[in-house]
Amino acid sequence: MSGVLGLLIAVGAQAAPWTVVSIFLLGLSLVCAGGHIAAVIAKQHALWREGRGR
């Protein structure tokens, strides 16, 4: 797996280093956004359950 990743990075670095960086940053931002959305949904669900419990 790491060999494939290393190969992709090597090929990408030869083509254009900024492409690899932008793809990495895009992936990182998607992970952060996903975590944020999950946290918001969990909070809303907890509030909804609290409201139903009363």
Image (tube, rainbow, N blue to C red):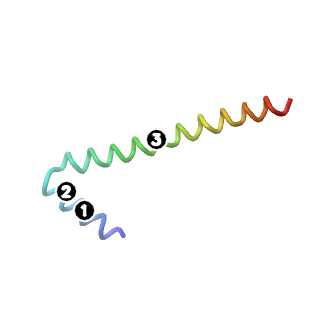
Question: Could you say whether the residue bearing mark 1 is in a helix, strand or loop?
Answer: helix
Asked if the residues shown at circle 2 and circle 1 are in contact, with their CB atoms under 8 angstroms apart, the answer is yes
**Closest to the observer, 12 or 45:** 45
**Image point (18%, 55%), residue name:** 13
**Image point (41%, 43%), residue name:** 30
Residue tagged 1: 8
Disc with the residue nearer the chain's start (2 vs 3)? 2
Q: Which mark is residue 51?
A: none
Number of other residues with Cα within 10 Å of mark 3, as a class: few under 14, some 14 to 19, many 20 or more: few
Q: Where residue 24 sits: x, y (%)?
A: 32, 48
In the picture, measured across the screen, residue 39 lies left or right of residue 4, that is right
Q: Residue 12 falls in which quadrant of the image?
A: bottom left
- In the rendered image, which quarter contains the C terminus? top right
Q: Which mark is residue 12?
A: 2
Q: Where residue 19 sits: x, y (%)?
A: 21, 48
**Image point (59%, 38%), residue name:** 39
Residue at the extreme left: 15
Separation of marks 3 and 1 at Cα, in angstroms: 23 Å
Disc with the residue nearer the chain's start (3 vs 1)? 1
Number of other residues with Cα within 10 Å of mark 2, as a class: few under 14, some 14 to 19, many 20 or more: some
Q: Residue 25 falls in which quadrant of the image?
A: top left
Task: Please state which amino acid type lies under the numbered disc 2.
Answer: Gly
User: In this rendering, is residue 12 above or below 38?
Assistant: below
Residue tagged 3: 32
Residue at the extreme right: 54
Task: Please state which amino acid type lies under the numbered disc 1.
Answer: Leu
User: In this rendering, is residue 43 above or below 1?
Assistant: above
